[in-house]
Amino acid sequence: MRYFLRKLLQLVIVVFAVTFTVSLALGAIPYAEERIIAAKGSGAINEEEKNKLLDSLNLREPTLVQYGYFVGDLVTLDWGVTLNGNQPISTSISDGLGISLRLMIYGQLVALLIAIPAAVFAAYRSGGLFDRFSTTVSFGFISTPNYVLATILGLLFTVRWKLFPAISTDVGFFEAPWDHFRNFFLPTIVLALPLAGAYMRLLRSDLVNTLQSDFITTARAKGVSTPRILFGHALRPSLFSLVTAAAVNVGALVGGSVVVETAFNLNGLGRRTVLGIFASEFRLVQITVVILALVYVITNFLVDILYGFLDPRVRVGRLG
Amino acid sequence: MSTLQTAVRRETGTLLEIEDLATHFATPGGVVRAVDGVTFSLDHGQRLGIVGESGCGKTILSRSIMGLLPRRNVIRKGSVLFEGTELTTMSLKDRQKIWGAEMAMIFQDPMTSLNPVMKIGKQLAEPLRIHLGSTRENAQEIVLKLLQDVGIPEPEKRLEQYAHELSGGMRQRIMIAMALACGPSVLFADEPTTALDVTVQAQILDLIEDQCREREMALVLVTHDLGVVAGHTDQIIVMYAGKIVEIAPTATLFSKMKMPYTEALFQSIPKLADPSHTRLTTIGGRPPNLVAPPDGCSFSPRCPYATDTCTKVEPELQQAEPGHLFACHYPVGSDRWNEVQVSLGRRSGGH
Ligand SMILES: Nc1ncnc2c1ncn2[C@@H]1O[C@H](COP(=O)(O)OP(=O)(O)O)[C@@H](O)[C@H]1O
Ligand SMILES: [Mg+2]
């Protein structure tokens, strides 16, 4: 319980630090006001509208007041509209987040489904044929840039075999499961393969170490079957690095899948953010950054809880 | 096949017959001859000690007998008959049916021998569930009884604990309980007390001995300490450089030891009668490199009695009396031995 509370406190501190920095960042952007006006189209609005717009951003208030307004707007979901097109920022972000979260979850699941069995088998026969083969393949995937993989798979699956649409559209899973699958299949694979390679390497090496532990010999001497040794005894204490890496990737994938989102024309959060930066949509970018920070922080919190589950010694603070 | 029943009807006669057993490791530095042609047998309910310095191949010998060795880079020879069944050619699946059920093993370091992330209760129940197909409730009942047998206070509480919440002695008791669970006919204990406090060591050894007696279970007690096996075994094997150099009933070994290596081990046991400042005799030098053991007797480079013969001709195991074998050209009591004793000033001339 103490462990839980300590982690919760850390979470609160991080959230404060991020919102504070993000709130001030706007003031640090050179010519922020001029850029915002320009993005709006300086000729299109009169002086009064200009002032109203700038007032709503609280740019001229003292720092702490600015922060107060920013947090107030954040929690009341009063996020305003985009400069270009007057679309509610909340709609834009929730649409983007929906796509990015799904991509992230699919990508992670596929990566783990490939990596875990492969790592277990490679570690079980470490140095064997499968181990060497899977090592080569993982390094191949790890070192292939996203856009190369996206291009190759895109060419094969959409142009050559015409199995999947070249341009993905965001079709809900429940409305049209088959279309949903077709649309998300390729981007998921492009995200998942390099992840699977990295996860497999991490888990394999931890497993090889665990399998040399005395308690594994104990389990063997009890007559525990090989699959139970691998999955029942060795896997759980070997999951630390994998869980840590997967957790870091949650945030990285939600906000940083720009290449894949662009390659398959999915309007995810990453892509919207990058476009937002070019279009001086500072408000949108600010809020996106806060949301991504929340994703990171919440994931980390959950992972800390998960560590405690993976190894009871963590809970009493004997490790880490 | 119910192992609980075999726990009641114990046979007599030979349990294990080991014939010319060898285990070598192919390493980049050469072939390590960890166990090199070992022959002996073990009767039902018999308690055997295997002694020798660190690195003499005791652990590998006991694991070779169980068949509990890594598969890779291992060269194996010889035969292990367990109740008449050849183990060395048995499939892994069949050996897994014997491990934990018919043969059990406990290890040196109770700190690392238990799974750190699995509750004690679950680990204890595992052999029962695997080998006897016990239900959860049934297994729990047996486990609680076992914990009482091995002298663990508050057994119910232990089931929910993890290894790190228990002391070293307590963990070794848990290991023993786990090994006893299915009523094996032989227990291998590999340095079971080496990692424990001196005060706990005697308790654990007594516990092992009591349980063996009660369950009519054979024991193979592996240790580097001749003092440990003295009071807890019927027969002792002295190993050196992967080979048996002396084997005898315990009392005989202590009263009529033949092998100078045994003598040296014996002299390195601290004795209660010694004044507290007495210097312990340690054996000079180190055990030989098992990749390229010396010619002749492997102990010859460290042996005060060694002659040219010893460095050239490897001594065969010979019989001193029925049941007592040794491998030495100039055993304790021989003329050469007396001569050296005199020259070392340990003994006056004559017999
Ligand atoms: N997997 C292995 N590969 C190579 N050599 C090994 C391996 N395991 C043990 N050995 C060697 O075999 C010898 C006997 O080891 P061991 O049986 O553990 O000795 P003891 O238990 O008597 O201290 C040692 O010299 C050790 O270095
Ligand atoms: Mg050993």
Image: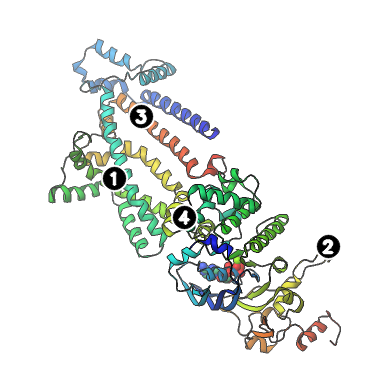
Q: CA distance from mark 3 to mark 4?
A: 52 Å
Give, as a three-letter code, the residue at label 3. Ile
Q: CA distance from mark 2 to mark 1?
A: 71 Å
**Which residue ends up furthest to the top in the rendered image?**
A48
Give, as a three-letter code, the residue at label 1. Leu
Chain of the residue under the numbered disc 2 shown in the image? B
User: Where's residue A237, x and y in %?
Assistant: 48, 49
N-terminal label among 4 and 2: 4
Residue identifier under label 3:
A291
Residue identifier under label 2:
B276
The label nearer to you, 2 versus 1, is 2
- Number of numbered markers: 4
How crowded pointer 1 is (Cα within 10 Å; few <14, some 14-19, many 20+) is rated as many
Chain of the residue under the numbered disc 4 shown in the image? B
N-terminal label among 1 and 3: 1
Give, as a three-letter code, the residue at label 4. Gly
